[in-house]
Amino acid sequence: MPEKPDDDPFHDCELGPDAVLGTRTYEDVLFTDETETPVNVLTGETPAHSQATVDEAQAFISSIDTDTPQIALPASVETQIETHSKPYTSAAFFHFKATGSLERHRAYHAAYDSDAFTVDFEADYASGDLTITVDRANES
């Protein structure tokens, strides 16, 4: 255990590094070409704002100016209807909607921001799966 909290990247986290070390796959969490979109009950058609492809979503997330790599997550049908938005949204690759909990989100974020760990991810937009791998930097 580090002597000072500043030396421990997980000092503000509910989970420690063991919670995120290794490789984990989060299934069916990414935007895909099969992501649910609203249908106008009068016309039977999907509104133009909800028509999008994975390629369009990837281009959008690539255009975001941030140091943290982004992924495309599906937007809820309700959000698409209420805000006339696309069927995807961008988020950090360790976002709680992808990893399943705010605690795990914070732990991945701590590992990603720390030089003591290497963090890699693979976003498979065909399956909707996100795989995150965390190793100690001296073990990789």
Image (tube, rainbow, N blue to C red):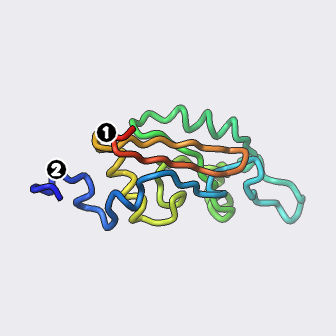
Q: Residues within 10 Å of mark 2 (few under 14, many from 20)?
A: few
* SS for dot 2: helix
Q: Residue 71 placed where, x, y %? A: 55, 45
- Which residue position holds label 2? 7
Q: Which residue is mark 1?
A: 138
Residue lying farthest front?
139
**Labels in figure, total:** 2
Q: Amino acid at mark 2?
A: Asp
Find numbered disc 1 in the image and state the secondary structure of the residue it sits on.
helix
The quarter in which the C terminus is drawn is top left
Sequence order check: which comes first, mark 2 or mark 1?
Answer: 2
Q: Residue at 42% across / 43% down in the picture? A: 119
Disc 1 marks a residue whose amino acid type is Asn
List x then y, in percent, for residue 31: 66, 50
Residue 60 image offset from top left, x and y in percent:
59, 36
Rendered view: 3 above or below 49: below
